[in-house]
Image (cartoon, coloured by chain):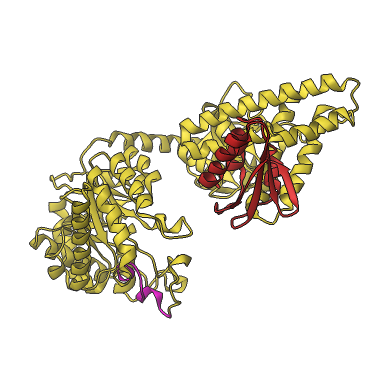
């Protein structure tokens, strides 16, 4: 399993647009991606559940990536967070 | 005959059958299914239809209004195919044996509730999106055409109010006008109506009843009157008004392409005042010769922090390129007084109209000014630019501002960034000091533009926002008109051109005066361009000039 931590810089937090594009990005891989904030964690493929976490600017989230292609997926997804969130 | 009073938000008169906007039914039947698998397939088919429709709508919105407009539909599309949403519906169908309509309704309610209870307004607003998406899927399940105007003839469209997704998918060839129960002057319906140039009346409330559907209705966007089953007199009156408006439009239409020239051959430029790149199409469609005032404040007002040089550059460049070589005068930042912006952190003033505003802020805080000037000069490479400084009272202010311009040009030259060498520099004449110093100021600039709203306020020492001062605030006051003449005379002695960019420019009662004192340019709102051209073409300056100038000296002329 791979993981990284990221602090959200987007003023609106994890909102519909980047969350939707993130889902598309994750679908390119077979690994399961989980977004964890405090006690709560969701499968990042679930757009509305992800939005429902209400992740705001300044919140730090942990992202885990687990699966056969976790190495390439982890790098790409961390890159995505930096560029879009 | 039934008469309903609403609020007109888009002008014009239209007649046609009243037609209620068709929406999927709000209530659905709920029942248990025998075969959950078949029901699930029904859902999947409806979901597919909805996703396909949303994709088409996104493309349509993109073509009509750009990427931002398409975003709404793309977001809806993502929600419609969301795994979490789909799983909840699947559970309802397979475990509870609910029919698909009920399963979608329940799931929508559950997700809408989740968003509605979040503490952030952005996420709260997403509750409406979930409902909108679910309504679309239910419409596909029940076979109700969404957004359809299922009428062979064009109609007056009635609705409670239209959502943005609904206004985009309307068949615009079928709409003669709008009547809505709710809404505001800035609602999507009002904006759409004004863009289409058809009448709209909002806020009629429950006076409009579904049983009126199909009846002949006449709406007058000028008065806000909705007349149902008009009697003969009322109908004749409204039809006459419609005919007159049509003739007026046709007549103005014929003025396009003609010069702004008086009967005795005096020419004057008619330009437009705009607030941003979105206004340029209206400038061009009304055949204006240029932009006489581009208020750059919108860039600062629409954000939470200072707009970057690049953001400003793109906006200026867009206007200059779209105006295709016609002159564009951009006024540098004009805030303070009645226009305050939080992130400027301006201390509260006792007397803001006489305070730290406009060019004074720019000279006091050169970093802000420097960014704007860099963006302006970079944009100058893409058209014919004039830069105008507001709220000038002294020659030294203009010299200092010009020094900043020279510094920016030096920087750009060193950095190898292209800019035009022919940028005109001008100032607003809106203070009595600028009027009295106009002979000296004229030696520093290429043009003057008179801001008559502030010029009247400062000349008459009269607050234009104080309702009790109505009869004291008189822009036709001879002091104001004499000031304009003095400015014109001093400008022309020094080869400087003079414009008017206040509301007074479009005042047809003063067109003869402006022509007589030799104003070179009038900058008005786009819709005033053609009426003004018509007026100009009727004036014979040589016949009226003597009387106009004599009136300026008469102490009896106070109106």
The answer to whether residue B354 is left or right of residue B2 is left
Q: Is residue B141 above or below residue B338?
A: above
Q: Position of residue A72 (x, y in %)?
A: 57, 35
Q: Position of residue B162 (x, y in %)?
A: 62, 40
Q: Is residue B102 magenta?
A: no
The answer to whether residue B283 is left or right of residue A20 is left
Q: Is residue B369 above or below residue B415?
A: below
Q: Nearer the viewer, residue B102 or B549?
A: B102
Q: Nearer the viewer, residue B464 or B298?
A: B298
The residue shown at (19%, 63%) is B402
The residue shown at (76%, 47%) is B113
Which colour represents chain B?
Answer: yellow
Which colour represents chain A?
Answer: red
Q: Is residue B264 above or below residue B445?
A: above
Q: Is residue B434 visible?
A: yes
The residue shown at (15%, 52%) is B541
Q: Position of residue B415 (x, y in %)?
A: 22, 51
Q: Position of residue B240 (x, y in %)?
A: 46, 36
Question: Which residues are drawn in magenta?
Answer: B350-362
Q: Nearer the viewer, residue B11 or B335?
A: B335
The answer to whether residue B263 is left or right of residue B276 is left
Which corner quadrant holds the N terminus of chain B? top right
Which corner quadrant holds the C terminus of chain B? bottom left
């Amino acid at each position: 399993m791979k993981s990284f931590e990221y602090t959200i810089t987007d003023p609106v937090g994890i909102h519909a647009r980047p969350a939707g594009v993130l889902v598309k990005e994750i679908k390119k891989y077979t690994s399961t991606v989980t977004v964890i904030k405090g006690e709560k964690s969701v499968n990042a493929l679930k757009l509305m559940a992800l939005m429902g976490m209400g992740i705001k600017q300044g919140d730090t989230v942990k992202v885990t990536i687990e699966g056969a292609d976790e190495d390439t997926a982890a790098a790409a997804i961390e890159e995505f967070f930096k560029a879009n969130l | 005959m039934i008469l309903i009073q609403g609020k007109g938000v888009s002008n014009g008169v239209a007649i046609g059958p009243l037609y209620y906007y068709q929406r999927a039914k709000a209530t659905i039947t709920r029942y248990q299914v025998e075969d959950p698998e078949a029901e699930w397939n029904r859902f999947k088919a409806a979901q597919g239809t909805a996703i396909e429709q949303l994709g088409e709508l996104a493309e349509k919105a993109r073509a009509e209004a750009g990427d931002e407009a398409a975003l709404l539909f793309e977001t809806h599309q993502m929600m419609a195919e969301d795994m979490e949403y789909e799983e909840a519906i699947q559970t309802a169908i397979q475990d509870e044996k609910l029919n698909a309509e009920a399963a979608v309704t329940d799931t929508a309610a559950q997700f809408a509730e989740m968003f509605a209870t979040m503490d952030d307004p952005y996420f709260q607003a997403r509750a409406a999106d979930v409902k909108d998406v679910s309504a679309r899927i239910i419409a596909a399940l029940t076979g109700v055409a969404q957004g359809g105007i299922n009428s062979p003839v064009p109609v007056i469209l009635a609705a409670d109010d239209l959502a943005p997704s609904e206004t985009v998918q309307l068949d615009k060839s079928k709409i003669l006008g709008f009547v809505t129960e709710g809404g505001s002057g800035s609602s999507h319906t009002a904006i759409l109506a004004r863009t289409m140039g058809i009448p709209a009346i909002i806020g009629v409330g429950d006076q409009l009843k579904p049983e009126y559907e199909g009846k002949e209705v006449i709406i007058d966007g000028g008065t806000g009157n909705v007349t149902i089953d008009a009697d003969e007199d009322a109908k004749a009156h409204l039809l006459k008004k419609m005919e007159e408006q049509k003739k007026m439009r046709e007549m103005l239409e014929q003025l396009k392409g003609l010069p702004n020239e008086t009967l005795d051959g005096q020419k004057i430029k008619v330009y437009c005042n705009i607030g941003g790149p979105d206004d340029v199409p209206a400038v061009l469609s009304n055949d204006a010769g240029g932009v006489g005032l581009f208020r750059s404040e919108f860039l600062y007002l629409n954000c939470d922090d200072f707009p970057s040089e690049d953001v400003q550059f793109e906006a200026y460049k867009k206007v200059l390129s779209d105006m295709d070589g016609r002159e564009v005068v951009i006024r540098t930042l004009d805030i303070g007084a009645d226009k305050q912006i939080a992130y400027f952190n301006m201390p509260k003033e006792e007397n803001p109209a006489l305070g730290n505003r406009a060019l004074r802020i720019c000279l006091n805080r050169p970093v802000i000014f420097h960014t704007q000037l860099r963006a302006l000069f970079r944009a100058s490479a893409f058209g014919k630019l004039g830069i105008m400084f507001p709220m000038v009272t002294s020659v030294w202010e203009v010299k200092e501002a010009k020094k900043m311009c020279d510094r920016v040009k030096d920087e750009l030259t060193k950095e190898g960034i292209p800019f035009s060498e022919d940028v005109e520099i001008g100032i607003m004449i809106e203070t009595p000091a600028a009027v009295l110093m106009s002979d000296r100021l004229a030696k520093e600039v290429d043009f003057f533009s008179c801001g008559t709203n502030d010029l009247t306020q400062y000349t008459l020492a009269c607050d234009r926002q104080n309702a009790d001062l109505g009869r004291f605030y008189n822009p036709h006051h001879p002091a104001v008109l004499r000031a304009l003449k003095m400015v014109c005379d001093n400008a022309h002695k020094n080869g400087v051109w003079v414009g008017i960019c206040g509301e007074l420019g479009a005042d047809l009662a003063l067109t003869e005066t402006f022509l007589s004192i030799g104003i070179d340019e009038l900058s008005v709102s786009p819709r005033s361009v053609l009426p003004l051209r018509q007026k100009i073409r009727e004036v014979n300056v040589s016949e009226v000039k003597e009387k106009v100038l004599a009136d300026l000296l008469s102490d009896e002329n106070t109106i």
